[in-house]
Image: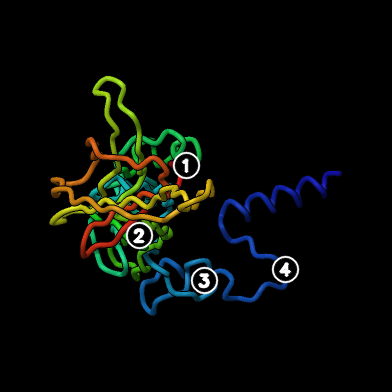
Amino acid sequence: MRRTLIRAGVAVLLALSGAAVAPGAPAHAASRCDQPEPPPTCNGGGGDPDPGPVDIAPLGAFDTMTFVGNGVRVTGWAADYDSSGPLLVDVWIDGAFAKTLTANAYRPDVAAAYPSFGAYRGYDAVVPSRHGSHTVCAWAINVTPAGATPLPHRGLGCKTYDVPVATNIQSYYDFSSKQWMVAFDDNVLGEASFEVRWDYYILQTLPGSSIKIASPQTRTFTLPAHDGTGRVSLPLWRPEHATKLTITAPGFGSASTTAL
Ligand SMILES: [Ca+2]
């Protein structure tokens, strides 16, 4: 009993003095870290060099895209563990840079998922763009700590849209003014005019009989240009047997509806 206590006491003293070396351990296990020359390998003892600052790739998402007439509204979020400030998000359209956004909009769901980022990591902005078929991509601009090897910016994804020159084409009877109207969303900037074409048919009775045949017809109207984009609504003749209503912006394209 007494011998055991003495042995334990010696072990404690050795440990406190820093001289405790496991039996059989190589001599260099107690390296001379207090001596600057030559440089000892004291970082974990493994001899690996200090890796220094390390870049962490940004996080984020490209959540929604909506065509709004003269641009696309894009929403999402982005953040970088290497930056406490709002991250920049570059938007490219069809492979060409379009706009830089700042991700500082309120997104409580981001804070819920990544508490250290906080709630103001969203982006929500309109990027100018035209009608037609286009691909929109968002990139979170990486922030690199001083001295670190930069990582590339992070692609948050791409979305495509295909918007014709006119959408929501309608023909309806306006009971207050008692006349037929044509209405559509003008998605074109810079048109010189619009053409409205009715496809319809008339019923003709064969001479000397009671047989009626449908005879296809078309009629075209020219409307003045509409400033900017947005809803166009104006009175216009409507045939009795309408089959198709087509809106054309000369030089830009056309769109039509048969839901009449
Ligand atoms: Ca980073």
Residue labelled with disc 2: 136
N-terminal-most mark, 3 or 2: 3
On the rendered image, what quadrant is the C terminus found in? top left
Q: Is residue 145 visible?
A: no
Q: Contact, CB < 8 Å: mark 1 with mark 2?
A: no
What label sits on residue 114 in the rendered view? 1
Q: Mark 1 or 2, which is nearer the eye?
A: 2
Residue at the extreme top: 176
What label sits on residue 31 in the rendered view? 3
> Residue 88, position in %: x, y?
27, 53
Q: Contact, CB < 8 Å: mark 4 with mark 2?
A: no
On the rendered image, what quadrant is the N terminus found in? top right
Mark 4–mark 2 Cα distance, whole angstroms, equals 67 Å
Mark 3–mark 2 Cα distance, whole angstroms, equals 58 Å
Q: Secondary structure at mark 2?
A: strand
| Callout 4 amino acid | Pro
N-terminal-most mark, 3 or 4: 4
N-terminal-most mark, 4 or 1: 4
Q: Mark 4 or 1, which is nearer the eye?
A: 1
> Residue 61, position in %: x, y?
43, 51
> Residue 126, position in %: x, y?
26, 46
| Callout 3 amino acid | Ser
Residue at the extreme right: 1
With 50 as the anchor, is 184 left or right in this view?
Answer: left
